[in-house]
Amino acid sequence: MLAADPANSFARYGLAMEHVKSGDLEGAVQQFDALLERDPNYSAGYFHGGQTLEKLGRFDGARDYYKRGLAVTRDPHARGELQAALDILGE
């Protein structure tokens, strides 16, 4: 799907999540970065990208993802998840 339509946010998100599931966390971060560069309003990308960065021990990067997500996300549930994740990291 992504090869046919590189701008397909859902396909890019799915690829990122497949990288997470396979243990390729660096590959996942690359895909989350690409997703959010093309579609900065894809709120799930911020949350799951931040979670992936946390697994890598990159807490400052995770905080950045969560803060960027909070800046653009209007959905109350997604905002709550992003804020809770940020609160856990101490901000």
Image (cartoon, rainbow, N blue to C red):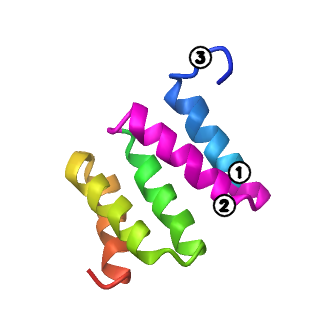
Tags 3 and 1 touching, CB below 8 Å: no
Of labels 2 and 3, earlier in sequence is 3
Please say if 33 is above or below 38.
below
Figure quadrant of the N terminus:
top right
Q: Identity of the amino acid at label 2?
A: Leu
Residue 26 percent coordinates (x, y): 64, 58
The residue tagged 2 is 25
> Could you tell me which secondary element the residue under label 2 belongs to?
helix
Packing grade of label 1 (10 A; few <14, some 14-19, many >=20) is some
The residue most toward the top is 4
The residue tagged 3 is 5
Q: Identity of the amino acid at label 3?
A: Asp
Residue 15 percent coordinates (x, y): 66, 40
Residue 39 percent coordinates (x, y): 39, 33
Residue 2 percent coordinates (x, y): 65, 24
Tags 1 and 2 touching, CB below 8 Å: yes
Q: Nearer the viewer, residue 15 or 30?
A: 30
Q: Is residue 74 left or right of residue 40?
A: left
Q: CA distance from mark 2 to mark 3?
A: 23 Å
Q: Is residue 46 left or right of residue 29?
A: left
Where are the magenta residues, as a range?
20-41
